[in-house]
Image: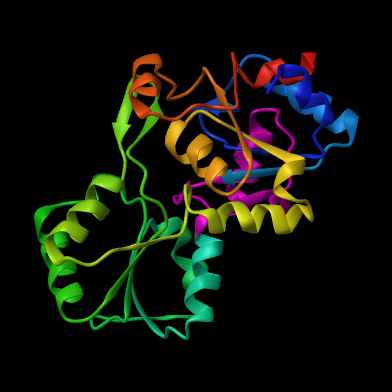
Amino acid sequence: MERNDLRHIRGLLADMDGVWFVDDRPIPGAGDALAALRARGLPLRLVTNTTTRTRAQLAERMRRMGLGVAEHEIVNSPTAAVHHLRARGVRRVRLVVSDAIAGEFAEFETSTAPEVIVMGDIGERWDYRLMSELFHQVLGGAGIVALHKGRYWQVGDGLALDIGAFVAGLEYATGKTATVIGKPSPQMYRAALADLGLAARDVVMIGDDIHHDVAGAQAAGIRGVLVKTGKYREDLVARSGVVPDLVIESIADLARV
């Protein structure tokens, strides 16, 4: 895939953190890139595994950085998880998620005898006692739904451990496999395509994560474009075994296509 091929796409999928901004600082040129997309009339969906903010909060965060994105342009894993649980008739859950998004699951009963444990980002609240409780609940019959299974993410001073380590640990200890809702799950990408009303061949996915953004999109039949911002590390990409369809310096490159 050549960079000029970006001129012929009909829609764009992109990650948020690490692509448009890091912490609360926009990537240089991100505003110009967004303006260029708007000028072309190119529909955009931001596909994110962030599970500490609602879609409205995520949109507001971007607006504060001068990046005008609407709530409906964001596809996140809590929304997809609610649809998954509802479709399977789940009634009782244990929520291991940020307080900020707990309200997204208000239709379900929270229980100490859950049918499903929903795992998301809870920062430094992870500890042995919590993992032991989850271990016993899974052994008692609870399923595991992970809002994502991220390995690491970019913070201001480097990479930080993500929840994938805790999801994988629970899987290893119990012998049960989690249902992963967020990237790189194909269902996240299919949801985004359905929202755009476009086929996989008509869009590209731009992200800073070689596994979740690039490989995940490619598994769903979407071309994956890697940016050299956010969590990008040349050595990690080289060891990944994943070959992006295109590598660009940053999202700012879209303003020059």
- Residue at 68 percent across and 17 percent down: it is 252
Relative height, residue 155 to residue 77 (above, below): above
Residue 6, image quadrant: top right
Residue 116 drawn at (x, y percent): 33, 75
- Residue at 23 percent across and 67 percent down: it is 176
Toward the viewer: 93 or 231?
A: 231
Q: Is residue 53 magenta?
A: yes
Toward the viewer: 125 or 183?
A: 183
Residue 231 drawn at (x, y percent): 42, 25
Q: Is residue 18 magenta?
A: no
Q: Which region shows up in magenta?
A: 48-77
How was the colour assigned to the protein in this rendering? rainbow
Residue 232 drawn at (x, y percent): 44, 21
Residue 246, image quadrant: top right
| Placement of the N terminus among the 4 image quadrants | top right
Q: In this image, 182 relative to 173: left or right?
A: right
Residue 29 drawn at (x, y percent): 69, 15
